[in-house]
Structures are given as structure tokens and as C-alpha cells.
Image (cartoon, grey):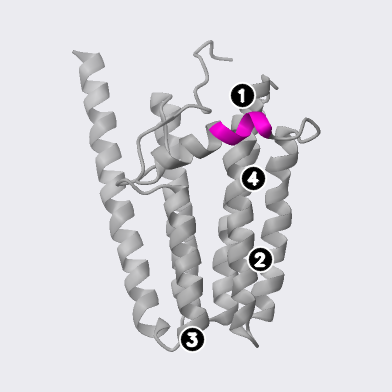
């Protein structure tokens, strides 16, 4: 095993809502009940994910169920916001376990959201959602590979992080409830192309950064 200090719990980079989010988290972490443990909050993502699938299935008949999908996204945001912070505050020591389980379940949660949209989407868009899931996963893979090479864990891309994405999804759900999905045949392909273009730009930036690090070490 390497003796290099593990920094998976120390994220680098900034996002639009980071300052507000940090202030909110730091204020409430000491006030959480003593019976709540960091792993309880981590495992809650499984419940939120399962309920998103249930409510999305119901939304096929009535889009009002998306209010509950949005509520689950908000609930997962809160539990995800506090799980690692609570562990650090109480010195629980589950740093590597937390890194692994938190991000594994983040992928499960992300996949359930995309699967939910596939359930309510008009016909002919399924492959776009498969592509969206693949590209969304590619962003995570890029973060993990870059972390393995640099020991700097960055999950914020162009000022956008998980928090901003969650609130964008909640906004999207609200639009769907009021406007339906008739506009999806135009916007879903555009969304996929935008995500793909962003990933290509991110991969190119990461490639240049790692190349420069190798050349600097070589010289």
C-alpha cells in the first residue's frame, strides 16, 4: 500500500453555491442528534434512489408525482451534504469507506434519476437517455482517474458541482409538471450534446494538466 496521504475527503475547486453551502453545513453539523451517524446518512441514498424510481413510475400517469421526485433529490442533497462533514466533525475515521460508498451510491442515485426520466419520456428518446447516463458517468470517471493521478479530488466542472446540478434537476421537474414533455424531442438531444461537449472539454483540460505535470517532473 502507498504511504501517500489519502485526500479523497478534501475536494478542490469551487462552485457557484459553495460559499452558502459551506456556511449552512458548518452551522448545522454540531447540532445533529448524537444518534445519527455518518454511515446512516450515507446509506439513506439507497432509500432516496428507490423512492425516485417508484415516484417516477407513478409520474407516467400523473406528472404531479415529480414533486415527490424533487423532494427525494432535496432529501439526498441534505443527507449527502452532512454525511462526510459529520464524520469529520466527530472523527469517526471512515475516510476511505466514506469516499468509496458515498460516490458509489451517488452513481446509483444519478442512474435512478435518469431511469426515472426514461419512464416518462416520449417515444424515441430512450437512446438519448442512455447516452446521458454514459456521459454523466464519464464525468465521474474523469474525476476518479484525475484523483488517482494527482491526489487532488475535483468534482466541480466549470463552476458547476453536484449541488447546482440537483437544483437544476428540481427546476427541470417543475417545468415538466407545468409544461409536460412535448418539448423533450428538441431539448433532450440538445442536453445530451451539451453534456458531451462539456465532457470533451473537461477531458482535454485534464489531459493537458497531466501532460504538463509529467513534463515538469521529467525536467
Task: Tell me the residue at 35%/61% (across/down).
Answer: 195
- The range drawn in magenta is 27-31
What residue sits 49% from the left and 79% below the top? 176
Image coordinates of residue 59 in percent, x first then y, are 63, 80
State the mark number for residue 88. Answer: 1
| Residue under pointer 4 | 79
Vertical arrangement, residue 113 with respect to residue 151, above or below: below
The numbered disc on residue 52 is: 2
Q: Going by the image, does 155 lie left or right of 77?
A: left
- Contact check, label 1 and label 3, Cβ < 8 Å: no
Instruction: Tell which residue pokes out farthest to the left in this image.
Output: 219
Q: In this rendered view, identify the residue nearer to me: 130 or 176.
A: 176
Q: Nearer the viewer, mark 1 or mark 2?
A: 1
Residue 217, image x, y percentages: 25, 15
Does the magenta segment cover residue 8? no
* Dominant secondary-structure state across the stretch colored magenta: helix
- Count residues near mark 4 (Cα–Cα under 10 Å), then give few for <14, some for 14-19, many for 20+: some
Considering every residue shown, the one lying at the far top of the view is: 3
Q: Determine which residue is flagged by label 3.
A: 180
Give how far apart the Cα atoms at labels 3 and 4 are. 30 Å
Which is more toward the observer, 85 or 131?
85
Label 3 Cα crowd, 10 Å radius (few <14 / some 14-19 / many 20+): some
Amino acid at each position: 500500500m502507498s504511504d501517500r496521504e489519502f485526500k479523497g475527503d478534501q475536494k478542490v475547486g469551487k462552485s457557484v453555491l459553495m460559499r452558502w453551502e459551506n456556511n449552512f453545513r458548518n452551522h448545522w453539523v454540531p447540532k445533529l442528534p448524537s444518534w445519527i451517524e455518518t454511515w446512516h446518512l450515507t446509506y439513506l441514498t439507497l432509500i432516496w434512489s428507490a423512492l425516485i424510481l417508484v415516484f417516477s413510475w407513478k409520474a407516467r400517469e400523473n406528472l404531479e408525482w415529480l414533486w415527490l421526485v424533487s423532494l427525494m433529490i432535496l432529501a439526498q442533497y441534505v443527507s449527502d451534504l452532512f454525511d462526510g462533514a459529520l464524520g469529520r466533525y466527530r472523527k469517526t475515521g471512515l475516510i476511505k469507506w466514506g469516499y468509496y460508498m458515498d460516490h458509489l451510491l451517488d452513481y446509483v442515485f444519478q442512474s435512478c434519476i435518469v431511469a426515472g426520466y426514461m419512464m416518462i419520456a416520449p417515444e424515441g428518446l430512450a437512446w438519448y437517455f442512455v447516452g446521458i447516463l454514459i456521459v454523466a458517468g464519464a464525468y465521474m470517471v474523469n474525476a476518479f482517474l484525475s484523483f488517482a493521478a494527482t491526489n487532488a479530488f475535483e468534482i466541480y466542472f466549470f463552476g458547476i458541482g453536484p449541488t447546482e446540478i440537483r437544483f437544476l434537476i428540481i427546476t427541470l421537474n417543475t417545468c415538466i409538471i407545468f409544461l409536460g414533455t412535448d418539448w423533450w424531442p428538441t431539448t433532450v438531444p440538445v442536453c445530451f450534446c451539451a453534456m458531451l461537449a462539456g465532457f470533451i472539454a473537461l477531458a482535454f483540460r485534464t489531459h493537458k494538466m497531466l501532460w504538463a505535470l509529467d513534463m515538469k517532473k521529467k525536467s
